[in-house]
Amino acid sequence: MNRRDLLKAGLVIGAASGLARAQGGMTPFLPKARNLIVMVYDGFSWEDFAIARAYAQRVLGRKLTLERLFGQGAFGQIHTNSLTSYVTESSAAGNAFSCGVKTVNGGLAVHADGTKLLPIFAAAKEAGKAVGLVTTTTVTHATPASFVVSNPDRNAEEAIAEQYLAFGAEVYLGGGDRFFSAERRSDKKDLYALFREKGYGVVRTLEELQAERANRLLGVFSSSHVPYEVDRRFQGVKVPSLKEMTEAALKRLPAYRQGFVLQVEAGRIDHANHLNDPAATLWDVLAADEALELLLAFADRYPDTLLIVVSDHATGVGALYGAGRSYLESSRGVDLLKDQKASFEFMLARLGQNPDAAQVKEAFRAMKGVALKDEEAAMVVEAIAKKAYRPDGVRYGVQPANTLSWAMVQREAARPDRPNIGWNSGQHTASPVMLALYGAGVGRGVQLGLLDNTDVFTLMSRALGLRYQNPVMTEEEALEVLAKRPGAEWVHPKETLAV
């Protein structure tokens, strides 16, 4: 059955009955939407929320927009497991959202046996809606790609860029020049020229983004992932913020008569957590909060818009832990984050492959506000130059960044001399994560309860009036397929550094 036939069939969504039971009958407050916006906080945990909330209140003197959303809309949590693993990754998580079924980690809108699935943004396009993807990762990365195309390999980003050209979304904004540029692609195809031939305005800088007037837009602002907000804000890195990219999308998409679907991904929260980098995580969460404020204002202005805000999984789980007598010194760790002005990614690029201890000390002093001891500086030198990793290279497997984080852990028990933030690992974790809905007709302060990540598909498809069911694969069937498949190198999270 092809895509159009699948839509015409009008099949009842398979997950709908389970969702109704889990939510205790949420249908009365779920609006029919002309426009759907899905904002994904990639790799975002409740510990990230707690630190950002504390920093916003204590240092910035304001309340997080995300915290306000929890009181103004419907709110709940979702399980994140994939088909064969309690710990998911972004493609399987994205598939659960976009296709409504569990899949094996690693592929986009596809089952392990090669059965293709129909992502909801593709279904929405078939129904006449405009489509937009905005992200701080490469625009061809797993979360945005899972909403529009099918590919057995999430890392095949050159091929995904070509699939984007064929798919024809109205807006693509993010990073990933190496997948579009003739000079960088392995096949030397000039995808920028091909997009221009199809009527896209192609922009590469913030200035070009703000000046461009084309209705269809491809914006690629970095070689790999878009640099972190902390580096954009404090180190003068010239790229658009997530809010600025979102503004560009919202200037175009409302003009389409049938409405639009838009995914906005704060994708580098995940990467910062992989690196165990508290400043990079904090400022990308705060940048997401600025974009969220824009989206809430849009939903208020256009009441036929449903906004879904969701995390796909937790990563690293960097937690503010208790410090001092009766934990009375704990908040100092939040204050110390004020001195952190660069990401580990930025630091590592400046240090190069063979720094000496003096260079390491100066980098930590200037960029992290931390005075390293001699043995700590030596630890960093060994991690970069000799691949000797601390505390280990298994649980803390995103190296050498995890060692840089370990070098600046709290040393003084009585009163934190460095941020008292501790990391579970450099990997994804299995915990439930947030889900929130906002829009006209969504109940204020309604508790959605604990749902499954596939229920997000049901919410979206109901709101858009799309009724179809993707094929379901059982865990046993998937494991049988995997047993016959040769092992392949796994790229994520190795590619979390933008190089």
Image (spheres, helix red, strand yellow):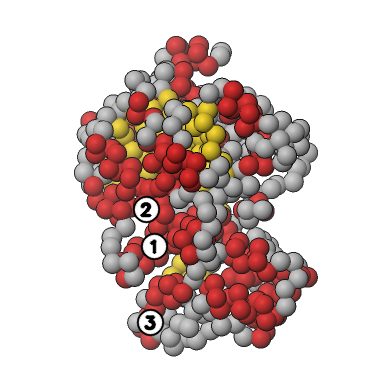
Q: CA distance from mark 2 to mark 1?
A: 10 Å
Residue 477: x and y, percent?
64, 31
Name the mark on residue 289: 2
The residue lying at 62 percent from left, 32 percent from top is 192
Q: Which circle, 2 or 1, is nearer the viewer?
A: 2
The residue lying at 45 percent from left, 50 percent from top is 241
Question: Horizontally, is 362 left or right of 242 in the view?
Answer: right
Considering only order in the chain, which callout, 2 or 3, is on the residue closer to the N terminus?
A: 2
Q: Which residue is mark 3?
A: 329
Considering only order in the chain, which callout, 1 or 3, is on the residue closer to the N terminus?
A: 1
* Amino acid at circle 2: Asp
Q: Which residue is mark 1?
A: 52
Among the 4 quarters of the image, the one containing residue 350: bottom right
The N terminus: image quadrant: top right
Q: Residues within 10 Å of mark 3 (few under 14, many from 20)?
A: some
Q: Secondary structure at mark 3?
A: loop
Question: Horizontally, is 95 left or right of 30 in the view?
Answer: right
Q: CA distance from mark 3 to mark 2?
A: 27 Å
- Which of the two residues, 346 or 112, is positioned nearer the viewer here? 346
In the image, residue 270 above or below residue 83: below
Among the 4 quarters of the image, the one containing residue 105: top right
Instruction: Look at the numbered discs 2 and 1 and tell me whether their residues touch, using CB distance below 8 Å.
Output: yes
